[in-house]
Image (cartoon, rainbow, N blue to C red):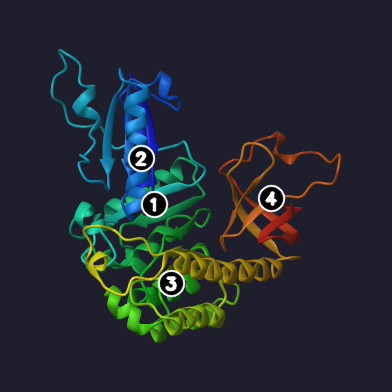
Amino acid sequence: MNVCFETFGCRLNRAETLEDEARCLARGHRVVTSHDQADVIIVRGCSVTGRAQHDCEKAVERLREHHPGTRVILTGCMPNARRFDISAFSRRRGDVDAPPPETPVPTSTARAYLKVQDGCSCGCTFCIVPRFRGEPRSTPFQDVLDRAKRFIDAGYREIVVTGCNLVLYSSEGRRLADLAAAVAALSPECRVRLGSVEPGEQAREVVRAMAETPNICRSLHLSVQSGSDRILSALRRRHSARGVDAIAAAAVQSMPLVALGCDVIAGFPGEGELDFQLTRSLLLRHPFSNVHAFPYSERPGTLAAELRGEVKRETRKARAHALADIGDETRRRFAKRFVGRTVDVVVESNGAPEGWTSEYLWLKERREKGGVMLGARSMRRQAKSFVVRSAHGGVLYGELAEDGR
């Protein structure tokens, strides 16, 4: 059977799709990229915003219209989605029930994606995800380590730890920082990258673990959302602007070249000019080099969709652009700090080597005109050291270090 996957949304959705692809291959099916070749198309949807849900629904409509003879299955964070189980439609007549095989390791990506947690109970007013993901649950600690070891044995040199809300990870008294350190301890040759974390005590623990563990990536992404305590209260967030200040300052003090990232919402109901300026000030106080700024989008079914004080859409967009511009400028300055330094990159390409540094900066190989393309021998998935020669637009350009690793 030929199976095609279409995935919308976050890293968690991506991790789940990769697991499903590996299961399909392990059962003897083919994973194809062409809809025309597919017997089944699995759409893993996202409804984090009304627009995201609309885009997924339209994609499913188009697939069913253009491929009427192909089975289209909707799964993921969507209304009317259902849990996808490869065994449910792959069993052939005459097959007998047997224990499911050990979950195979996905091998189609340059970096491994390790799901350790699902669900959320925070109850933020703008978020619909708990309706689809359910209550928090964590993968047992030893199961995570066993899975991570299999990724390492398969040749991966970066493991991206992901979940619906990572700070809710809890197993046998261990929390997220304990988990990150334990996965990192499995092999000094493999680095660990954490997805976004909520500001709070667990984020402070993560900062300490990151500073003490060389192969935990120096990249801390915080789900900030606003720099106004009044808006944070309306969002039902559990942190304050002062708390974000403390975490960001501690990270920079202990790791001067740490990459700070954040998510921010512009134009939440009731957000006035002062609230916006407080968010803008927060981004200017700290070197947030990876800013995801979104204009607020009403999501039917959330408490926020019923709030008064709607901000005009053009104002939301303008504020989001202004916040993103701050992040872009900070990223350009941050990248220039690496010129002349040696950085480690897990190569993602099959051609000329390029990939992410520990500090979540994209690096491309710099070659003089007519120079030899080192990527002629594939370095994909390998960890390589590069000397950064220049930085443009937040992107690094470097040459393979002499030792090359």
Which residue occupies 80% across, 46% down? 367
Number of residue marks: 4
Measure the alpha-carbon separation of dots 1 and 3: 25 Å
- Earlier along the polypeptide chain: callout 1 or callout 3? 1
> In the image, residue 290 lies at what x, y percent?
54, 65
Which mark lies nearer to you, 4 or 1?
1
- Earlier along the polypeptide chain: callout 2 or callout 1? 1
Residue type at mark 1 is: Cys
Say if 377 sits above or below 89 in the image. below
Which mark lies nearer to you, 4 or 3?
4
- Earlier along the polypeptide chain: callout 2 or callout 4? 2
Labelled disc at residue 209: 3
User: Secondary structure under badge 2?
Assistant: helix
Q: Which residue is mark 2?
A: 17
Which residue occupies 22% across, 58% down? 130
User: Secondary structure under badge 4?
Assistant: strand
> In the image, residue 187 lies at what x, y percent?
47, 55
- Earlier along the polypeptide chain: callout 4 or callout 1? 1
Q: Which residue is mark 4?
A: 364
> In the image, residue 59 lies at what x, y percent?
37, 36
Q: Which of the two residues, 46 or 147, is positioned nearer the viewer here?
A: 46
Q: Is residue 237 visible?
A: no
Label 1, residues with CA under 10 Å away: few <14, some 14-19, many ≥20:
some
Measure the alpha-carbon separation of dots 4 and 1: 25 Å
